[in-house]
Image: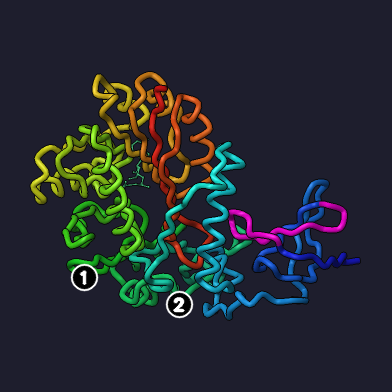
Amino acid sequence: MEREEILVIDNIAYGGDGAGRLDDGRVCFVPFSVPGEKVKVSIVKDNKNFCRGEILELVEASENRVEAPCQYFGECGGCAYQHIDYDEQVKIKEAQFRQVLKRIGGLNIDEDDVEVVSSTNKWNYRNRISLNARRTETDEVIYGFIARDNRSLVRIKECLLAQAPVNELVPDLNKTKWGHKNRQRDRPLRATIRHASSNKETVAFYGKAPVGLPWRREVYNDREFVMPAGSFSQVNRDVAEALQRMCAEIISSLEACTFVIDAFCGSGFLSMGLRDVKVVGLEIDAKGVEAANFNAQDQGLTTHKYVAGDVNKLLRQRLGKLAPETTLILDPPRAGVGPGTIKAISKRSPKWILYVSCDPGTLGRDLKEILPLGYKHKKLAMLDMFPQTSHFESLILLELDNA
Ligand SMILES: C[S@@+](CC[C@H](N)C(=O)[O-])C[C@H]1O[C@@H](n2cnc3c(N)ncnc32)[C@H](O)[C@@H]1O
């Protein structure tokens, strides 16, 4: 027989599930709950140390619970927090940032200030989406997001997180010339739709961006940047601008800093806000590097140079004699930095490390290796780059404490 339990949700774990305790002391994870709520759940997974429940009834609903506006919410694997008032979403993310740094990174930041940047746009902020493609039994090719079960596809007509020009192209994915080709493939490729803020161009491509697709032109903090169609770029412009300004302010406040290594630099986004310092950027995507050098030249940044290659291999030789004057920006992908990066830092430790992360779990893991090298944290920030989802961006400034 189905087992039912009543519990109170204490907090929301990173990833989006609410967590509360059963009478036997075990933690029970409950998706789509809100902190403070009393819920009746059906136990759908029962492990020795924890279990999972699905809400049957809201015994006492939170005042922070709101109606989720998206027709796919609950089924689609993309959003986790549409049912929570936005200000509460931001508080939840700040609490998770603190919790993950403490639990995984071994850092106690209970008393420290965390600068919090909310998103101006709570909806329609994404300048790009990638949709998975599936062939149906009736031989139709459909596009959508992977469902919460991690297997099925939720076919979508629009995504409430995407900007209007991005959504306009969703119904046409089968009608474009490349979309038509994609329909002929045995296994149709993922479609990406991107909208550029400066030249207002919206493109859709399937699989990798085709060679020859023009660079996107984006405006950040009143300056234009080019970015290759297939290369990384920040999805939420307002929050990305705040991040770029924050990095520039932090580094310019480090008076002894004369040299910056922008590792995992993409098209040079984070270091383009820097003036009066020497900058070397490292990035594995050669097209991103080409754009970064173009951007630097276009903006008259004659002391910036961007180099193609693997950070894990190149960093050691770049961290040279200037280490006491160096800030190392680390902005790795979700997987965090590799062992080569940690090894390089341990051999030639830069005075400052500015770690920008889109995954607090891997940030915590990497900090566990970096902090024992003698670093102390100086600044912390949580930036809500991805409203309605469980993801967020964070930043931590570390300083080498030689004392
Ligand atoms: C989160 S993005 C940051 C990009 C850039 N800092 C920005 O804000 O636009 C991570 C970048 O790391 C690059 N990357 C991933 N693995 C790498 C590696 N081993 N060496 C160098 N770059 C890498 C990716 O191509 C991507 O551009």
Asked if one can make out residue 332 in the rendered structure from this viewpoint, the answer is no
- Front in this rendered view, residue 180 or 131: 131
Asked if the stretch drawn in magenta spans residue 171, the answer is: no
Could you tell which of marks 1 and 2 lies nearer the N-terminus?
2
Asked if one can make out residue 3 in the rendered structure from this viewpoint, the answer is yes
Disc 1 versus disc 2: nearer the observer:
1
- Quadrant hosting residue 339: top left
Numbered circle sitting on residue 157: 2
Is 363 situated left or right of 295 in this image? right
In the image, is residue 288 above or below residue 162?
A: above
Task: Residue 19: give x, y in percent of width and height.
Answer: 70, 58
Q: Which residue is labeled 1 in the image?
A: 200
Task: Residue 229: give x, y in percent of width and height.
Answer: 26, 56
- Quadrant hosting residue 76: bottom right
Asked if the stretch drawn in magenta spans residue 23, the answer is: yes
- Front in this rendered view, residue 245 or 18: 245
